[in-house]
Image: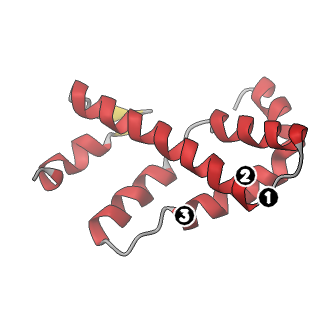
Amino acid sequence: MTSKIKDIKSPISEEMAQFEVKFREYMKTEVSLLDKIMGYIVQRKGKQIRPMFVFLMAGTCGKIGDATYRGAALIELLHTATLVHDDVVDEADYRRGFFSVNALWKTKLRC
């Protein structure tokens, strides 16, 4: 992570650490294949700029609470879904240097 992103993240470092734990919990499911895919996605997270903005704005405008964590998780999940969709459309085999979800599971996800 670049030093500028670390500087931005500094005031919310505790919240981001807690977000990591909560996000993993939120992404758990009882559907075996979906749980495996979500685990793969969560392990290969990006810079998490969007959740950072959620926490920075929530802290500026008031209190950071459970709704803030859920909102940050929803935004991160939506962003991740768009990346998975892009990989499907582009038939991409890699995302951030790792196999894409599409490359690993495309034949198992078709209906």
**The N terminus lies in quadrant:** top right
Q: Answer yes or no: do the residues labelled 2 and 1 have beta carbons within 8 Å?
A: yes
- In which quadrant of the rendered view does residue 66 lie? bottom right
Mark 2 vs mark 3, CA separation in Å: 13 Å
Q: Nearer the viewer, mark 1 or mark 3?
A: 1
**Helix, strand or loop at disc 1?**
loop
Name above or below for residue 94 compared with residue 66: above
Residue 83 point in image, percent of width and height: 40, 34
Query: Viewed as shown, does residue 102 lie left or right of 62?
Result: left
Query: Viewed as shown, does residue 76 lie left or right of 11?
Result: left
Residue 14 point in image, percent of width and height: 83, 54
Amino acid under label 3?
Tyr
Report the residue at 50% width, 53% height from top: 43
Q: Residues within 10 Å of mark 3 (few under 14, many from 20)?
A: some
Q: Which of the numbered marks, if any, corresponds to residue 26?
A: 3
Q: Residues within 10 Å of mark 1 (few under 14, many from 20)?
A: few
Mark 1 vs mark 3, CA separation in Å: 15 Å
Residue 76 point in image, percent of width and height: 55, 43
Amino acid under label 2?
Thr
Q: Which of the numbered marks, if any, corresponds to residue 68?
A: 2
Name above or below for residue 103 compared with residue 109: above
Q: Residues within 10 Å of mark 2 (few under 14, many from 20)?
A: some
Query: Viewed as shown, does residue 25 lie left or right of 1?
Result: left
**Helix, strand or loop at disc 3?**
helix
Amino acid under label 1?
Gly
